[in-house]
């Protein structure tokens, strides 16, 4: 396997396609954790790419392959595999393989899903719309939604790494829409982001300068709080779509966090509850998943606890986040969700420490009346108030770092 610092340019300029043509099995590394080294490949001197150019009778751009070339290379190469390194929910590194078969099964599904969910109902032009991508492409969510989807749909993708660059791009998009005057264009924008970015941008964006009415905001990686989603949608007159899934399973469902706590599983996902855990079967699985201890009776048993009624899954928390206190099973995620319901609590991390002790790291304030409304067994034994919460590079809460504060 070849480890690659997966900067956006690695994908946009055709370097990823060169790796596929060279038969390399690439492991994507998060640029946030490594410094970028090495030069870009010289495509003009690459014999495999030159041969492919002749077959396609297509010009190659100066800094890499054209969009048409990249699509054709990825589609026509008989077999390829890539590996994603993920920190997971607890910060423990894991490596998961995905082959061309699973990648395209999901991409072909998502193209239809996005057309039915966003383009067709709003009479928007697929070819004239753009993607704003403000997340790394090294994780499965960024790779599928930030690279493969725009590529396959023939849409421009604009990469933004900082909050200020995101703001500037949103302002530029708004000014472009305004240039049409009273004529409402059928141009749309799909913004690929994560909940933590939206929360950080909430106070930085001016609703008079940023018009998101024609924008679909897609989030994933962690659950977005209903309160945050409602505030953002109301301020900017937009819509937020949350994709539910994981690196190993691929996408499993979706919800609109401002409207529903339940997740609507995709039609092609078979699901059932095994031992309180959601178990799924999907065409997005890599064959290696069949050999893992989590695989049972043809289903992958996730760590997600909840209730399943038809295709609606109500998430209760992670299996690894259940402890026993005074002989009772306590869901730490349930306590987190209770704390987040209070108006002056912006965010919270709840962890266990010592023996049967519960700690809460709180961004915001809790009143005595707030605490009195919580069942006594769910009240944290120790609470620390902080201006911000520790996060992993992928934007998820860093429970290990939070736990260390209580020892």
Image (cartoon, rainbow, N blue to C red):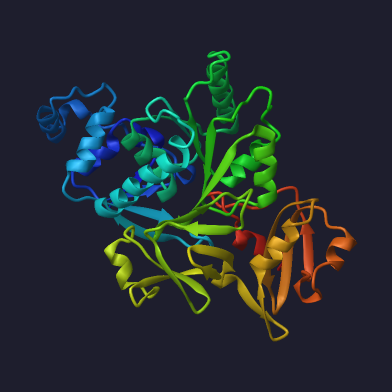
Measured as percent of width and height from the top left, residue 178 is found at 57, 16
In the image, is residue 127 above or below residue 315? above
Q: Compare residues 6 and 67 and report the one nearer the observer.
A: 67
Q: Residue furthest right?
A: 368
Q: Is residue 14 above or below residue 335?
A: above
Place of residue 191 in the rendered image (x, y in percent of width and height, measured from the top left): 51, 36
379 on left or right of 78:
right
Q: Residue at x 61, y 61 (%)?
A: 399
Q: Residue at x 41, y 61 (%)?
A: 94
Q: Can residue 74 be seen in this snapshot?
A: yes
Residue 279 vertical position relative to residue 39 in the rendered view, above or below: below
Quarter-of-image position of residue 251: bottom left
Tally of numbered tags: 0
Q: Is residue 5 visible?
A: no
Please tell me which residue lies in front, 49 or 122: 122
Residue 127: image quadrant is top left
| Residue ID at (78%, 71%) | 381
x and y percent of residue 341 in the render? Answer: 74, 57
Residue 371 lies, in percent from the top left, at 84, 65
**Looking at the image, which residue is at 31% across and 55% down?**
98
Q: For this view, does 72 lie left or right of residue 297?
A: left
The quadrant in which the C terminus is found is bottom right
């Amino acid at each position: 396997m070849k480890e690659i610092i997966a900067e956006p340019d690695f994908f946009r300029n055709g370097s990823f396609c060169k790796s596929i043509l060279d038969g390399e099995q690439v492991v994507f590394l998060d640029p946030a954790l490594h410094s970028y080294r090495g030069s870009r490949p010289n495509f003009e001197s690459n014999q495999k790419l030159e041969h492919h150019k002749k077959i396609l009778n297509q010009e190659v751009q100066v800094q890499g392959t054209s969009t048409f070339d990249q699509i054709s290379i990825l589609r026509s190469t008989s077999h390829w595999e890539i590996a994603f390194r993920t920190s997971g929910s607890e910060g423990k590194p894991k490596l998961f393989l995905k082959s061309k078969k699973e990648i395209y099964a999901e991409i072909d599904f998502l193209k239809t899903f996005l057309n039915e969910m966003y383009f067709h109902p709003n009479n928007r032009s697929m070819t004239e719309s753009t993607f704003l991508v403000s997340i790394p492409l090294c994780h499965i969510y960024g790779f599928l939604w930030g690279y493969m989807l725009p590529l396959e749909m023939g849409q421009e993708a604009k990469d933004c790494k900082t909050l200020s660059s995101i703001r500037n791009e949103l302002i530029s998009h708004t000014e472009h829409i305004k240039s049409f005057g009273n004529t409402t264009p059928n141009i749309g924008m799909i913004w690929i982001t994560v909940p933590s970015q939206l929360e950080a941008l909430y106070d930085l964006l001016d609703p008079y300068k940023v018009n998101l009415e024609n924008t679909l905001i897609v989030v994933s990686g962690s659950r977005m709080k209903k309160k945050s989603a409602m505030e953002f949608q109301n301020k900017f007159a937009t819509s937020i779509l949350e994709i539910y899934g994981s690196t190993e399973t691929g996408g499993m469902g979706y919800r609109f966090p401002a409207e529903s706590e339940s997740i609507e599983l995709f039609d092609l996902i078979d699901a059932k509850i095994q031992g309180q855990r959601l178990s799924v079967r999907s065409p997005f699985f890599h064959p290696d998943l069949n050999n893992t201890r989590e695989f049972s009776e043809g289903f992958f048993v996730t760590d997600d606890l909840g209730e399943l009624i038809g295709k609606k899954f109500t998430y209760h928390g992670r299996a690894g986040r259940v402890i026993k206190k005074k002989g009772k099973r306590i869901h730490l995620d349930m306590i987190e969700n209770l704390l987040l319901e209070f108006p002056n609590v912006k965010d919270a991390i709840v962890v266990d420490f010592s023996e049967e002790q519960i700690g809460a790291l709180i961004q915001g304030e809790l009143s005595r009346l707030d605490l009195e409304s919580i069942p006594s067994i769910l009240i944290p034994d120790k609470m620390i108030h902080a201006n911000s919460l520790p996060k992993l590079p992928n934007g998820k809460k860093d429970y290990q770092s939070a736990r260390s504060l209580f020892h």
